[in-house]
């Protein structure tokens, strides 16, 4: 059976999912929007809608036999071969066909995506020639990536680069070639199976979140429509043909009118204002929002962009770009420039009388806070503490879904299993990502070996073999796989953690991190520091339950031997390296960064900073600092300073939660 000719469920018969259908149509009108990423749970018609869009769009005229789908009426967009024919005075024969839908498989290689050496031609002729890849086939069509979050990151990078430039540039194996690659990019994903990197996420012009309808009547209608389609698809499609033709004509009309739509300076300013209010990075959001608003106005049949068009565009463009707002300025910075009171304010004696009192009280509180913090810092440096030595066991706070914590991908070859970090592996298990001339594993990369040997076949003696391969041609595979980390939790259990019951929240965060470690198949160890020293509460283990129990019973109180804690955590990692050199270690320090116990007779905080720099110099170890210091009028930021010295990723304890402001806004958009 030819699956490319199977009957497709009509686009106009899809029940609900109006935002998804609009996003797909807008990209069909203007592919330079940058594609659409559809996020949603399984069974929400993501793939159905994409394939239905391809069936909906009208036919296009192409040069007959051209693998790049060249438009015969656009000379500048022709591939080098078609341009050469035109220059020679050869007339290009044409044909019409439906817009192609290229379904990118997850196992695809970079060679198949961008194009590679034509082996047969190279072997026969001894010359290099390009075999076009999937980007060539997708030109002027649709490139669909199902489960894009599971696709190898470097493949996604290649596709997004081509989509952004509208050009595929190939420089490999002695081939230098460039061709147009303008396509409608559509990615779908189920967030339950993992997220895209923020850098890749931002490259999609539009992102939407969908879910199944909760209206019983619509669910019943959906079931009946699908049943009718499955029973007699040809008859079902015929009944919706009028709707399909009308929608197709509307899209074509919008494409032709797009260049004539007007947008005022006020509407452009509104685009920038909404982007600034969302705290987006860069200017891509402003540009795409303007372009999306133009398409919406054009699709709705208007001559000029309205404020409603901008607001609708912002829902589609800002969804995946919203960021947390920067921290508010300190109160004393806000008071630097005070405006004189207006006559109206002077007429309100009650407010005028209260204001000095409030200001005096705030100043008094500020001085008290400053004196207390100053005394705290002095005690820290002198090795003293006014915190009571009594120990207390605090309960575990609420757990939450942890934001993705992933170590950087490295070039070290490791063994192991797990689900957190990508690493290269010396075994023959894992995804084949590239090849190398260096021979270590005997994992033959047959494709690369043949490509290396092919251009030289006319000069080599081939006796009873199709291709002669020499030692210099042999290439080996480089593979990549996911493994678990060895995570060492270094926890501050000193008396300062009991202030404001911070330890309750901290224990909740650690339990949440432990649950995440269990899901990622990590090995964990637990180090706590308080009093005069630190100790390993839990040696390296896979037992998350044991770590959970020890943490529940962990008492809090005493001084803060920060340097002891960091040193012992690092020593734990070094000791395990001797047992298993393939581990991928991650040290997570949970503290406010204060110290008042010396390990070597110097200043406690300075010693901790020196140990942090020592860890930074060890490229084998990744680190994270979780700051438990409360935000307020006075903030020393010692944990942040420590993270800089250690070269760590830095989080405030509240930042670990996955349900940050971004997710709250996303939920609002879904309502």
Image (tube, grey):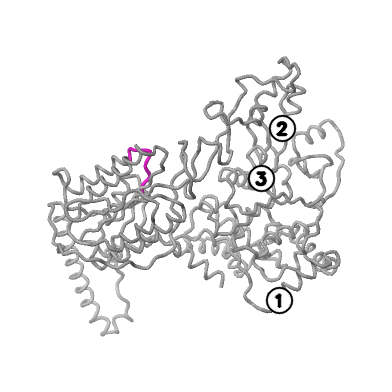
Depth check, front residue: 421 or 35: 421
Nearest-to-viewer mark from 2 and 1: 1
> What's the CA distance linking mark 2 and mark 1?
52 Å
Specify whether 434 is left or right of 525.
right
Residue 218 in which image quadrant: bottom right
Q: Which mark is residue 220?
A: 1
In primary-sequence order, the first of circles 2 and 3 is 2
Residue 366 locus on image (x, y percent): 20, 67
- Residue in view at x 17 percent, y 67 percent: 368
> What's the CA distance linking mark 3 and mark 1?
43 Å
Residue 519 locus on image (x, y percent): 46, 56
Give the residue number, with chain letter if any, for mark 3: 166
Give the residue number, with chain letter if any, for mark 2: 130
Depth check, front residue: 178 or 545: 545
Q: Residues within 10 Å of mark 2 (few under 14, many from 20)?
A: some
Residue stretch rendered in magenta on the structure: 616-623
> What's the CA distance linking mark 2 and mark 3?
19 Å
Element on which disc 3 rests = loop
Residue 647 locus on image (x, y percent): 35, 44
């Amino acid at each position: 059976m030819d699956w490319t000719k199977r009957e497709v469920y009509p686009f106009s018969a899809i029940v609900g999912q109006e935002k998804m259908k609009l996003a797909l149509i807008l990209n069909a009108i203007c592919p330079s929007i940058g594609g659409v990423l559809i996020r949603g749970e399984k069974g929400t018609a993501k793939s159905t809608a994409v394939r239905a869009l391809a069936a909906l769009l009208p036919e296009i005229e192409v040069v007959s036999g051209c693998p790049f789908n060249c438009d015969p009426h656009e000379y500048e967009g022709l591939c080098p071969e078609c341009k050469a024919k035109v220059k020679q005075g050869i007339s290009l024969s044409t044909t019409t066909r439906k817009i192609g839908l290229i379904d990118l498989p997850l196992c695809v290689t970079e060679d198949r995506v961008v194009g590679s050496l034509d082996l047969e031609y190279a072997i026969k002729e001894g010359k290099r020639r390009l075999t076009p890849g999937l980007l060539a086939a997708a030109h002027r069509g649709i490139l669909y990536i199902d489960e894009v979050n599971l696709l190898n990151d470097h493949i996604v990078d290649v596709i997004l680069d081509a989509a952004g430039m509208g050009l595929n540039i190939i420089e490999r194996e002695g081939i230098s070639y460039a061709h147009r690659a303008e396509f409608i990019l559509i990615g779908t994903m189920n967030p339950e199976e993992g997220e895209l990197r923020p850098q890749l996420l931002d490259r999609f012009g539009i992102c939407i979140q969908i879910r199944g309808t909760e209206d019983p009547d619509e669910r019943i209608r959906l079931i009946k429509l699908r049943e009718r389609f499955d029973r007699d698809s040809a008859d079902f499609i015929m009944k919706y043909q009028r709707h399909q033709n009308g929608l197709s004509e509307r899209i074509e009309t919008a494409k032709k009118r797009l260049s004539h739509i007007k947008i005022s300076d006020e509407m452009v300013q509104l685009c920038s204002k909404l982007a600034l209010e969302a705290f987006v990075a860069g200017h891509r959001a402003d540009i795409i929002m303007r372009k999306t608003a133009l398409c919406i106005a054009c699709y709705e049949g208007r001559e000029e962009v309205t404020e409603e068009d901008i607001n609708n565009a912002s829902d589609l463009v800002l969804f995946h770009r919203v960021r947390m707002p920067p921290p508010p300025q300190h109160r004393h910075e806000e008071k630097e420039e005070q405006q004189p009171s207006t006559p109206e304010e002077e007429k309100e004696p009650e407010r005028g009388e209260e204001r000095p009192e409030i200001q005096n009280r705030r100043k008094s509180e500020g001085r008290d806070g400053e004196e207390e913090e100053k005394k705290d810092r002095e005690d820290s440096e002198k090795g003293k503490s006014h915190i009571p030595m009594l120990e207390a066991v605090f309960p575990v706070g609420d757990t939450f879904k942890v934001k993705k914590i992933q170590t950087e991908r490295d070039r070290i070859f490791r063994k192991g299993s797990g689900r957190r970090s990508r690493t290269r592996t010396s075994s023959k298990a894992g995804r084949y990502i590239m090849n190398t001339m260096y021979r270590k594993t005997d994992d033959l990369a047959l494709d690369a070996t043949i490509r290396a040997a092919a251009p030289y076949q006319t000069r080599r003696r081939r006796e009873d073999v199709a291709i002669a391969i020499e030692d210099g041609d042999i290439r080996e595979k480089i593979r990549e796989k996911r493994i678990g980390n060895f995570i060492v939790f270094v926890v501050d259990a000193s008396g300062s953690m009991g202030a404001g019951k911070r330890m309750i929240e901290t224990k909740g965060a650690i339990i949440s991190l432990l649950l995440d470690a269990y899901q990622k198949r990590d090995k964990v160890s637990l180090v706590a520091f308080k009093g005069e020293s630190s100790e390993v509460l839990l040696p390296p283990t896979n037992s998350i339950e044991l770590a959970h129990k020890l943490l529940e019973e962990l008492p809090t109180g005493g001084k803060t031997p920060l340097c002891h804690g960091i040193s012992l955590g690092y020593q734990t990692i070094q000791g395990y390296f001797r047992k298993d050199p393939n581990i991928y270690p991650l040290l997570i320090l949970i503290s406010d960064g204060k110290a008042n116990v010396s390990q070597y007779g110097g200043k406690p905080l300075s010693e901790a900073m020196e140990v942090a720099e020592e860890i930074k110099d060890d490229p084998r170890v990744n680190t994270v600092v979780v700051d438990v210091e409360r935000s307020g009028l006075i903030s020393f930021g010692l944990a942040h300073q420590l993270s800089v010295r250690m070269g760590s990723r830095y989080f405030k304890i509240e930042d670990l939660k996955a349900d940050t402001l971004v997710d709250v806004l996303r939920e609002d958009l879904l309502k």
